[in-house]
């Protein structure tokens, strides 16, 4: 499970980006630039996590969670 430690930081970053994106989307239209930047950051973080992921595939993880 040492791989989990390796991915904790990017996943935490991804979570923060999602929270920022959500907050920006619920604000006034004047914050669309902020929302766009948050979205771009989210996509970048998502690509980083995906590129470094060595755990189970998404489908394997979903199946495992459904079996629990």
Image: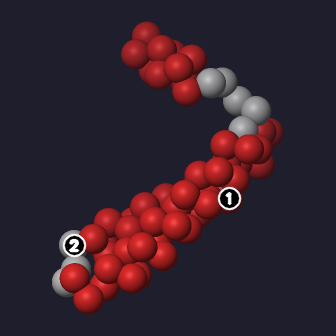
Q: Residues within 10 Å of mark 1 (few under 14, many from 20)?
A: few
Give left or right: position of 39 versus 28.
right
Give left or right: position of 22 versus 62.
left
Question: How many angstroms separate mark 2 from mark 1 (CA)?
Answer: 26 Å
Estimate the x, y position of residue 62 in percent, counting from the top left: 47, 22
Estimate the x, y position of residue 59 in percent, counting from the top left: 53, 20
Quadrant position of the N terminus in the picture: top right
Estimate the x, y position of residue 66 in percent, counting from the top left: 40, 16
| Residue 33 position by quadrant | bottom left
One can see residue 12 in this view? no
Residue shown at 22% from the left, 72% from the top: 26
Instruction: Say which of 11 and 49 sits in front.
Output: 49
- Height in image: 46 above or below 57? below
Residue shown at 22% from the left, 82% from the top: 29
Residue shown at 61% from the left, 59% from the top: 45
Residue shown at 48% from the left, 76% from the top: 37
Give left or right: position of 42 versus 52.
left
- Residue extending farthest bottom: 30
* Number of the front mark, 2 or 1: 2
Q: Which residue is mark 1?
A: 9
- Height in image: 38 above or below 4? below
Quadrant position of the C terminus in the picture: top left
Secondary structure under the numbered disc 2 in the rendered image: loop
Q: Which residue is mark 2?
A: 26
- Height in image: 59 above or below 8? above
Looking at the rendered structure, which numbered label has been put on residue 22? none
Query: Which of the two discs, 2 and 1, labels the residue nearer the N terminus?
Result: 1
One can see residue 52 in this view? yes
Q: Residues within 10 Å of mark 2 (few under 14, many from 20)?
A: few
Estimate the x, y position of residue 38 in percent, counting from the top left: 46, 72
């Amino acid at each position: 499970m040492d791989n989990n430690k390796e991915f904790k930081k990017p996943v935490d970053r991804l979570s923060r980006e999602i929270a920022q994106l959500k907050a920006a989307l619920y604000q006034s239209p004047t914050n669309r630039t902020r929302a766009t930047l948050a979205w771009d950051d989210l996509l970048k973080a998502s690509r980083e996590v995906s590129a470094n992921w060595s755990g189970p595939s998404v489908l394997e993880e979903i199946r495992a969670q459904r079996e629990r």
